[in-house]
Image (cartoon, rainbow, N blue to C red):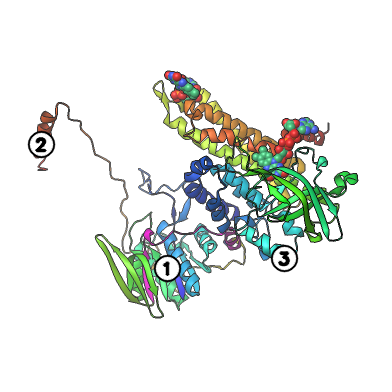
Amino acid sequence: MIRSNPEELIRKSIAKFVDNELIPSAQEIDEKGEFPMEMFQKIGKMGVFGIRYPKNKGGAGGNTTLYCIICEELARGLMSVAAITAMQCLMGTNFLFHFGTKEMHEKYFLPAMRGEKISCFCLTEPEAGSDLGNVSTLAKKTDKGFVVNGMKTWVTNGPVADFYTVLCQTDPAKKLRGLNFFFFPKDTPGLSASKAFDLLGTRTTQISELAFNEVHIPHEYMLGQEGQGLNNLLSILSEIRTMTAALAIGLQRAALDDSIRYAHERAQFGRTISKYQLIQAKIANMAVNLEASKLLTYKATRMIDNKEECLKEASIAKYFATESACKAGDEVTRIFGAYGYSMEYSAQRYYRDNRFLLYGGGTHEILQPNIARWVGL
Amino acid sequence: MRIIVLVKQVPDTTEVKLDPKTGNLIREGIESIINPDDRHALEAAISLKEKTGGKIIALSMGPPQAVDALSEAIGMGVDEGILLTDRAFAGADTWATSFTLGKAVEKIGGFDLILCGRQAIDGDTAQIGPQVADYLKIPQVTYVFEIEAVRKKSILVKRRMEDGYERIQCELPALLTVIGELNTPRYAMVGGLIDACREKAPIKLWNAADIGVQTCDVGLEGSLTHVIRTFAPKSQRQGEMIEGDAEAAAKSLIGKLKENSLI
Ligand SMILES: Cc1cc2nc3c(=O)[nH]c(=O)nc-3n(C[C@H](O)[C@H](O)[C@H](O)COP(=O)(O)OP(=O)(O)OC[C@H]3O[C@@H](n4cnc5c(N)ncnc54)[C@H](O)[C@@H]3O)c2cc1C
Ligand SMILES: Cc1cc2nc3c(=O)[nH]c(=O)nc-3n(C[C@H](O)[C@H](O)[C@H](O)COP(=O)(O)OP(=O)(O)OC[C@H]3O[C@@H](n4cnc5c(N)ncnc54)[C@H](O)[C@@H]3O)c2cc1C
């Protein structure tokens, strides 16, 4: 039996898309700063958004390894496009997929898989960032359903999303056990998004606040069993962290590729700068970090695919790959000399976009103590 | 409508490098891709199927790893892939390749249209399409850049010429070779790619016996031409700057052109 290897095949196919479609327009998309609708739809057309979901339920029948390969390749082209893809495949649609009604599946999930509807995921609040126990958007149970009041912030896709998955508190006395996810269609009365934030990096991601003012929703909009919100979040936390690591790999590759190309082209003192050991050291370190990031990340994806518990491995991968991406973004702007400081070249974008990876899925100040604890502190 | 698309896997380079010692293609480190013109043939087949229904079979001859080209074709929307793979097929020239592909097409049978790319970027001969049509004794139109209409028994296409185009109506079954102008190939669906890798994927492997050919009629043995040597021509162009004021420079230039019998 001779068959192709799906990982190689999908990597090659997405890489071709990135090289031919995404990279040539990355600069323009980034400068425009608008939601990259055309790119989003093109990615939807390739069936990418369903990569984690089974074929018989509207997905592509892939797994987390394939998902991360796609995230990595797209991030090599443009982080913001990779980020909204990552959102659409995982956080934005996961609970709708698992807990939504048949009608929600038809009306929202399937169109989202085709790139016709945009999703988002709302955890963070003004007073609840790393400390999600402090989530205070209140969903009060009534006879007809729930009445929701509160405020979310840092909502990726907030201003453009067609539906929202929102973490709410149903009973403050229960603390973490009172957290639950809810589904909201865009036009629900009482729900409003702010203007998009002005950002340092990933400038096309539309991020906003989301205000809930006496928002009435039916019972079936609670996603999952009551009291299971935290557990449901934990069920995808390893995958979120691993995906972030994959995005970080993509950025490292882009920075390394550009560095190598520029070092070969640029001559000073009669030789290309590739001949200088200090430049070689930078490139060697970038390559080493990249290789290690890959090993950590794809170790975690395989554990997820094998249904093994791997929060430790995922956290280590996210932490290391992201720190490596931050270093790569720094080094590429040094290797480029003054041109690394110019908006004309991509180097500056890697330097800005790498910051995106630092916050979501757990800041490193949160991850480090956890990793220390897992190894015995 | 039943369509067969001929697909070749080629090394991904427009600048094919040759080993200066052996004269062979250097394939190491170069990724394999579907030949670019063939991608347009696939797109044409898939969009025809979307309009008229039917079935598309992608047919390729190559080593086992050429299955990737068929998997990608399935990801794009082709229904079935057939890989002609056998040690005996190795080293085939265009004659032996066309014969082998023709035999496989006969075995598939019952087709309305064969689509192929104009030429492959590794060999650049543009002979396979015409030779397969000739073997099968069906009409052929080459350099197709527009498919205007598909009718029950005929097809109306435009064929690119150096100084314009020809509009040709042709009876079916027929073979078309297409050029890049025809369409923009789609990217594969990731779900289709995954399915193409499964054990039960609709991909068949046929060897010499499967298509009923003698090994002496295919591959190197069945080839009518033999490559004696392959080499990259030395690039010998050299520029020369003519110094001085315009008048003197022009005079000097004319002198040099005359000297070389160029004017
Ligand atoms: C580009 C971008 C997109 C985002 N998209 C989304 C989204 O779609 N949905 C969503 O819900 N959120 C989103 N966020 C928000 C993100 O999840 C939060 O930024 C993250 O949870 C951290 O919270 P915070 O920013 O409030 O930082 P804080 O929690 O206030 O942290 C501030 C600083 O204190 C440190 N710190 C906090 N607690 C501790 C501790 N116990 N020990 C040591 N140090 C600590 C942090 O590491 C950090 O350095 C996004 C953020 C960004 C930047
Ligand atoms: C904001 C800004 C303002 C500026 N203003 C001025 C100005 O007013 N006037 C002016 O004249 N210039 C100005 N410059 C240019 C600045 O002086 C140059 O950027 C600087 O001299 C470095 O040159 P380069 O950018 O061409 O980098 P390059 O010299 O090309 O260096 C590229 C990379 O190679 C490394 N490299 C080069 N040679 C070696 C070596 N021998 N060994 C090891 N590594 C090496 C460098 O460290 C760098 O990492 C400005 C630059 C910036 C960013």
Q: Which residue is mark 3?
A: A103
Residue range highlighted in magenta: B173-196
Subunit bearing disc 2: B
In percent of width and height, residue B100 lies at 41, 68
At 62% from the left and 67% from the top, the residue drawn is B200
Q: Earlier in the sequence, mark 2 or mark 1?
A: 1
Outermost residue on the right side: it is A173
| Mark 2 or 1, closer to the camera | 2
Q: Is residue B2 left or right of residue B15?
A: right
State the CA–CA distance, disc 2 to disc 3: 82 Å
Query: Label 2 is placed on what type of residue?
Result: Ile
Amino acid type assigned to the residue bearing label 3 in the image: Glu
Across and down, in percent, residue B26 comes to 41, 47
Mark 1, residue position: B215
Q: Which-is-in-front pick, marks 1 and 3?
A: 3
**Magenta includes A339?**
no
Q: Residues within 10 Å of mark 3 (few under 14, many from 20)?
A: few
Disc 3 CB within 8 Å of nearest ligand 1 atom: no
